[in-house]
Image: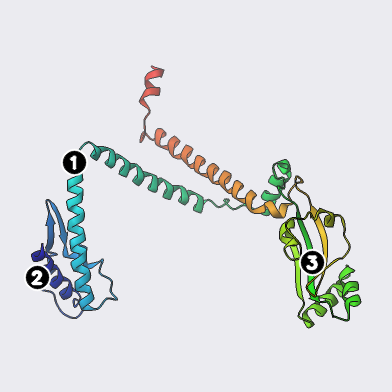
Amino acid sequence: MRFFTEIALFAVVVMGFASCQELPNYFVDDMTVARVGRKDLRVSDVEHVVPKSLSSADSLQFVDMYIDRWITKQLKVQEAELLFPSSADDIEAKVEEYRQSLLIRKIEQYYIDTEPDSEISDADIEAYYNAHKSDFRLDKTVVKGVVVAFGEKFRRKDKLLEAMKSTKPDARQYFRDICTKNNFALHEITEWTDFGEFLALLPTMRSRNYDSLLTKSDVQKMNADGIQYYFRITAVLNKGEVQPLEMTRETIARVLKTQRYGEIIRAHEEEILRTAIENGHARIYVKENKNE
């Protein structure tokens, strides 16, 4: 084995200089550098696996190890073929089945990619949502709202509270400006959020039930460790209610894509089957015999 390895190491080093000088004929001929039974490892097989970033010395070491691993692999395969001869056909069948599945997956993706009307629109999603609202029920309470935390010694609490209560755009901006100017911790929750996550922004305890907070739409207050908390729940959806469209959009899109892709693939399958039978490329003899 070392004899072949030494030849291979020298061959790869020489081939590394192929762009600078002409190779000797015996390297150009892609000589065999190792053999196990009827399996050959050739210079070209080794050449393309050697990382180009390696130094000459590291390349030699890499090739040496590669050839050893290749020979060991072939020996193990041959040993398995001797010990388990009945498994060969089953393995070949599985390999062929896997090869075909990869090709089929590739052609199906080609069908989808080349279909001009395969995209899912917002109108498609909304139509599906309206037709299947009963399928989308909340398994937990979700809320929208705002939480601000600041030092209890802040003197303009009344102004902050007044601005926070208002729904006017100018007042809302004034509220944000106060928070920004004084570096208050402000959380404006504009997307539907688990009520438990909202409570985590407040000085609450897991052992207590805070459902009573959901019934109040005005600004509420809490205090802990010298920190004042103002919070307001602006919208509530309780467990068991229909999920809003914005929460189901991605799920519906996945469902519609699966359906649309399935329709595209089935249409192509029907077309290629019909065409193949019409032009004689495919025949179904069982059906023909039944018709006789």
Structural crowding at the residue carrying mark 1, measured as other residues with C-alpha within 10 Å and reported as few (<14), some (14–19) or many (≥20) = few
Amino acid type at circle 3 is Val
Q: Residue at x 47, y 50 (%)?
A: 109
Q: Secondary structure at mark 2?
A: helix
Foreground residue, 10 or 203?
203
* Alpha-carbon span between mark 2 and mark 3: 79 Å
Q: For this view, does 276 lie left or right of residue 122?
A: left
Residue labelled with disc 2: 25
Res. 195 image quadrant: bottom right
Foreground: disc 2 or disc 3: 3
Above-or-below relation of 140 to 286: below
Of circles 1 and 2, which is in front?
Answer: 1
The N terminus appears in which quarter of the rendering?
Answer: bottom left
Which mark, by number, is residue 265?
A: none
Label 3 SS: strand
Furthest-top residue in view? Answer: 292
Whole-percent x, y for residue 17 in the image: 19, 78
Alpha-carbon distance for marks 3 and 1? Answer: 71 Å
What residue is shown with label 1?
A: 83
Residue 203 position within the rendered picture, expressed as x and y whole percent measured from the top left: 76, 66
User: Is residue 217 something one can see in this rendering?
Assistant: yes
User: What residue is shown at x 12% (from left), y 64% (from top)?
Assistant: 31
In the image, what residue occupies the spot 22% across and 73% down? 59
Which amino acid type is shown beneath numbered disc 1?
A: Leu
Of residues 161 and 104, the one nearer the viewer is 161
Q: Which residue is mark 3?
A: 146
Q: Position of residue 45 (x, y in %)?
A: 21, 62
